Amino acid sequence: AQTVTQSQPEMSVQEAETVTLSCTYDTSESDYYLFWYKQPPSRQMILVIRQEAYKQQNATENRFSVNFQKAAKSFSLKISDSQLGDAAMYFCAYRGFNSGGSNYKLTFGKGTLLTVNP
Amino acid sequence: EAGVAQSPRYKIIEKRQSVAFWCNPISGHATLYWYQQILGQGPKLLIQFQNNGVVDDSQLPKDRFSAERLKGVDSTLKIQPAKLEDSAVYLCASSLESRDRFNYGYTFGSGTRLTVV
């Protein structure tokens, strides 16, 4: 079974600074997708960035980038020039096959609460 | 495009009572998911539908939880009887197709916060 581990329950960063959130995962699959989602107090999950495992190049989306280390099964999120609006829960998620092997499923980590200090 | 609609937004019930949540996915999305998110934890998949068929309910407590997706569109999740540990946010999500490697766009609703007292 796939598992996703986020070892940092909470992180804080000063406005305009850079912060890195960690994520590791365990899988026996070779082809999968990884995601970072943001969950503000409104509770809706918002996609921040995604990475296809078959792509060696790290994904970037404006101020958000990832460091994907496939062999180490590591997938960290870097937020540059942090803004007050970045404050939220951040979840790392893995998309792979379910136990029956017939459908894809999304498995989440426990999340990291990011605080941005003005 | 309209998002995933969920209702109610909040619900407070006493233990041993029953409760139902409703979800209306994105139009045309074949796959619908129900997640349980306990405070301080990540969402846990309870059940996954492909059209109106169940493809994964391995983590659904079937003695008290049930879900259906009639006609492959709307879905309801029911808890009967509720326990204190069922207090959580129940998130609904949908995607185009869960069997397609390249269709990985998930859209989440805002969830229902359930408090069991």
Image: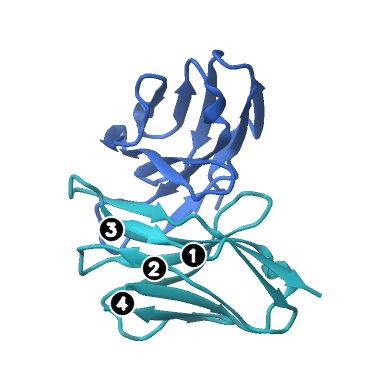
Do the residues under discs 4 and 2 have CB atoms within 8 angstroms?
Answer: yes
Q: Could you say which is closer to the camera, residue B26 or residue B63?
A: B63
Q: Which residue is mark 2?
A: A24
Name which of mark 3 and mark 2 comes first in the sequence.
2
Estimate how packed mark 3 is, as few (under 14), some (14 to 19) or many (20 or more) residues with alpha carbons within 10 Å.
Answer: many
Find the distance from the CA under tag 4 to the CA under tag 1: 15 Å
Rendered view: A73 above or below B47? below
Chain A drawing hue? cyan
**Residue A97: quadrant of the picture:** bottom left
Residue A7 marker: 1
Find the distance from the CA under tag 1 to the CA under tag 2: 8 Å
Q: Chain of mark 4?
A: A
Q: Chain of mark 2?
A: A
Rendered view: A28 above or below A68? above
Is residue A82 in view from this perspective?
yes
Rendered view: B40 above or below A14? above
Q: Which residue is mark 4?
A: A72
Q: Nearer the viewer, mark 4 or mark 3?
A: 4
Left or right: where A86 falls relative to A28: right
Q: Residue at x 81, y 75 (%)?
A: A118
- Secondary structure found at label 1: loop
Q: Which residue is mark 3?
A: A96
Q: Position of residue A78 (x, y in %)?
A: 54, 79
Q: Are marks 3 and 1 on the same chain?
A: yes
Find the distance from the CA under tag 4 to the CA under tag 2: 8 Å
